[in-house]
Amino acid sequence: MDYFLTEDQQMIKELAAQIADEKVVPVRAELDEKEEFPWEIMKVLAQSDMFGLFIPEEYGGLGAGALELAIAVEELSRACVGVSTTYAANALGTYPLLLFGSDEQKNKYLPDIASGSRLVAFGLTEANAGSDAAGIQTTATLDGDEWVLNGTKQWITNGGEAEIYTIIAMTDKSKGARGASAFVVEKGTPGFSFGKKEKKMGIRASITSELVFEDCRIPKDNIIGKKGMGFIVAMKTLDHSRTGVGAQGVGVAQGALDEAIKFARERVQFGKPIISIQAVQHMLADMATEVEAARSLVYSVARYVDSGAKDISKVSAMAKLYATDVGMKVTTDAVQVMGGSGYMREYPVEKMMRDAKILQIYEGTNQIQRNVIGQALIKEAASKK
Amino acid sequence: MKIVVCIKQVPDTSEVRINPETNTLIRDGVPSIINPYDLHAIEAAVRIKEEGSANVTVLTMGPPQAEDALREAVSMGADEAVLLTDRAFAGSDTWATAYTLAKAAETIGFDLIICGKQAIDGDTAQVGPEMAEFLNIPHVAYVKNIEKINGGSLIVHRLMGEGHDVVEASLPALLTVVREINEPRLPSLKGKMRAKKVEIKKLSGDDINADGSLLGLNGSPTQVKNIFAPEVKKDRKMLEGSPDEQIESLLSELKTLKCI
Ligand SMILES: Cc1cc2nc3c(=O)[nH]c(=O)nc-3n(C[C@H](O)[C@H](O)[C@H](O)COP(=O)(O)OP(=O)(O)OC[C@H]3O[C@@H](n4cnc5c(N)ncnc54)[C@H](O)[C@@H]3O)c2cc1C
């Protein structure tokens, strides 16, 4: 189908697809098996300017938007969600600086992020604060010209490998959700270390680690936005990044659909290729239809975000919710179409199914997305009366 | 430092078929690619540029659609692109091609010329060394490592059957490179954007002050009389095992055949 991409968007899609097919597909099974961080691929992405896609030109980026990022993420996800998570989490960690950073912070960090020479991570979640992000206990206390950070962040993508961390911490516990602030912390700062590295079901090429802050002192100017704005920074960041998670759902679903079709044409049972069996065709037809629907929604929302619209919470939650549910369903169905072969590690779909599951969980579970959409519906209805 | 990289657009032979009647390649519908060895030549030049300072010009002789190959080279980091195009170039064999490329390189100006080892459609590996002869400059073929370039010379490693030679050559010089030298990068987005807009400089036989009698079919001593596929001999047998066992079976085979 023609998605009416511009010449530049088409070019981004082709290059991302080339990287996915030539550099990711041949190594994805090994990266998964060995739980190995994909540095080689990150270098290729850096050399190809992929890290600069959504960074303004004045900071060395390409000045493109949510749609271009979604297209690149989709293509990488078609090959490996472990790789695309590493790439997309970099964008997640960058949004606080991009959306709320001071000129000094942007000048200091964005050029290195655009060139891919420094990777970024975003630290919000803690042991006792997952869906309930307001429950975070990490604190930042002002002491003279420095903030002193204490606490532990859990399950942070790119933790340990990234050089730059955007962190949400409480600056005034008495104020509840209004008492949080966002900070930028560099790897190597005394008092900042890395704890447990998680062993995961899927996206095993990506790294998920604990961040430990023990009297970690950072300059006063490392606060992002104003004091007390931490949750606004976090929520706006997630509003922007969720379209990208939707794109991961589209990509992994497309990858699984491609494999299922290829297999169904080759596998012969009852004297004919199984693709000629109507029950199989119907499954493939549903899968293909859902992938198109998910892609249309993700692209539409990305275009809406790029229009400069402010009310993007509801639609970006919808894109994330729908496209990642499609990702889970289509990868599961691909395993079904391929039968026992689909269940074996010799074929890529069992990994795709394991990988797809995370998309329904991180950056807000799909239940939380429904909450966001529900809240927006109530607000819209109330404002109409 | 000025580097000229010679590249050739070739049919992707992994997708090519042979016309059984004429024994020529069926090129219709076959995608064109940059000769794979030439990608290594481009990469080598771009790395020299990144490590120090150099201006990289890619040069090709070919039909107008060879522009695509030049643009791809620019998307990988080459600075300028030159297309040698003229009806008079048609029918060139390796000798006439090398002469034409040499005249073009002279016109462009260079300190170093880098070529791929050979082109996958002709497989002769002649053009690079022949060019160096026309230009009367030293050449090193089968280069697998450029160790260093300083002032007026360079030190390179030449791949040999077993191991490699370390060769020093004075500049200007010509190198042909093998796959082992590097892993060619993929294009970058900024490179692709530049490639879209870059001006492709076109040069004709006159522009490079070439002697017309040495161009194209006229200038080509090679004449193709006939093309045929070598006969496949099926009555062959591989003897396996340790050398002693192989000798044993060889002797018994020869005895059965009454050769000894
Ligand atoms: C691999 C991986 C990578 C991650 N990367 C990052 C990262 O880079 N940065 C970061 O900050 N975090 C990261 N996270 C954390 C992730 O965002 C959280 O796991 C997620 O927000 C859910 O929180 P939780 O796991 O604590 O689940 P919980 O909040 O404990 O939820 C458990 C279940 O209860 C449901 N539930 C909870 N509250 C509600 C509610 N109000 N309404 C309806 N249902 C509800 C949930 O939907 C879920 O089904 C990562 C997590 C994983 C697994």
Image (tube, coloured by chain):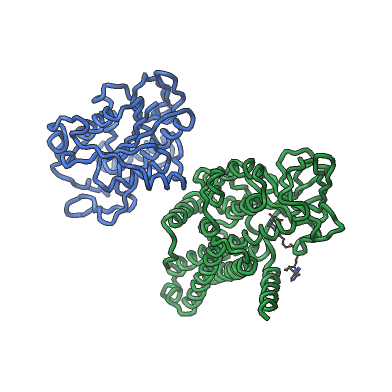
Residue B7 lies, in percent from the top left, at 32, 38
Q: In the figure, B207 relative to A169: above or below?
A: above
Q: Residue at x 18, y 33 (%)?
A: B206
Q: Nearer the viewer, residue A106 or B136?
A: A106
Residue A56 lies, in percent from the top left, at 55, 49
Q: Colour of chain B?
A: blue
Residue A191 lies, in percent from the top left, at 80, 40
The answer to whether residue A77 shows anywhere in this view is: no
Is B23 left or right of B13, judged from the image as shown?
left
Farthest residue in the front direction? Answer: A385
Residue A296 lies, in percent from the top left, at 51, 69
Q: Residue at x 40, y 19 (%)?
A: B153
Q: Nearer the viewer, residue A164 or A280?
A: A164
The answer to whether residue B91 shows anywhere in this view is: yes
Q: Quadrant of the N terminus of chain A?
A: bottom left
Q: In the figure, B42 relative to A226: above or below?
A: above
Ligand 1 sits in which quadrant? bottom right
Farthest residue in the bottom direction? Answer: A385
Q: In the figure, B4 relative to A40: above or below?
A: above
Is B156 left or right of A25, judged from the image as shown?
left
Q: Quadrant of the C terminus of chain A?
A: bottom right
Q: Residue A324 sits in which quadrant?
A: bottom right
Q: Nearer the viewer, residue A298 or A109?
A: A109
| Chain letter matching colour green | A
Is B136 left or right of A171, judged from the image as shown?
left
